[in-house]
Amino acid sequence: MPIYTKADPTRRFLAVLIDNLLATILSFLPVWGGIAAAGYILFRDGFDWPGMRRKSLGKQIMKLNLVRTASDTKPDLQTSIARNWMLALPPLVGMLPFLSPAWMFPLGVAVWLLEGLKVILNPQGLRFGDGWAKTQVIDSHHPGQAPHPEDHLTKKTLLEKQNQRTRLIR
């Protein structure tokens, strides 16, 4: 498994804020707001729609990429679900009729604190979701780590780029 450089934690935090702001706005939609918010959080890293490029809005704005560390494939919806299921729980809990929506906030804070601490303490910046999905968030602007931000990264393309740069330096 290749070792990637840890993405800048500040930029990751800002990306999460952007994504959570969007999810919060979606949560205010009548009737389906919680489902829309949870759906965005759950699937945000797997859509290959124009403009999404298999990374969330926050990752795009903060110039971060998501790579799969265990296979030579692009992140997909299954990867996104494996990576983000725990983060999608709070908006869904807020919709349960037998629980007060007030439970959504403390549950969300607990989940985000656990994941955030894991990112800070882990040498590669991996959170629990990254471990489950075998992914890692990296800076797309870091030399030797990523091709043009429009490109989808796979382990193979990333390693090829690194090998090309190594040959050029010699």
Image: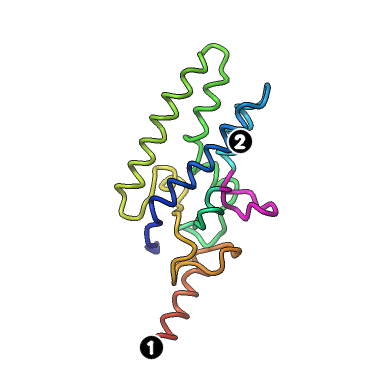
Q: What stretch is highlighted in magenta?
A: 44-57
Mark 1 Cα shell of 10 Å, populated few (<14), some (14-19), many (≥20):
few
Q: Position of residue 76 (x, y in %)?
A: 59, 51
On the question of residue 145 being in view, the answer is yes
Q: Where is residue 163 in the image (x, y as percent from the top left)?
A: 44, 78
Report the amino acid beneath label 2: Gly
Left or right side of 35 for 102: left
Residue 52 to residue 31: above or below:
below
Identify the secondary structure beneath mark 2. Answer: helix
Mark 2 Cα shell of 10 Å, populated few (<14), some (14-19), many (≥20):
some
Q: Quadrant of the C terminus?
A: bottom left
Q: Name the residue under label 2.
A: 39
Tell me, yes or no, whether the highlighted magenta stretch contains residue 150.
no
Q: Mark 1 points at which residue?
A: 170
Q: Where is residue 54 in the image (x, y as percent from the top left)?
A: 60, 53
Report the amino acid beneath label 1: Arg
**Residue placed farthest to the right in the image?**
50
Tell me, yes or no, whether the highlighted magenta stretch contains residue 55.
yes
Q: Which colour scheme is used?
A: rainbow
**Residue placed farthest to the top in the image?**
98
Residue depicted at x 49% and y 69%: 158
Q: Position of residue 21 (x, y in %)?
A: 54, 37
On the question of residue 65 being in view, the answer is no
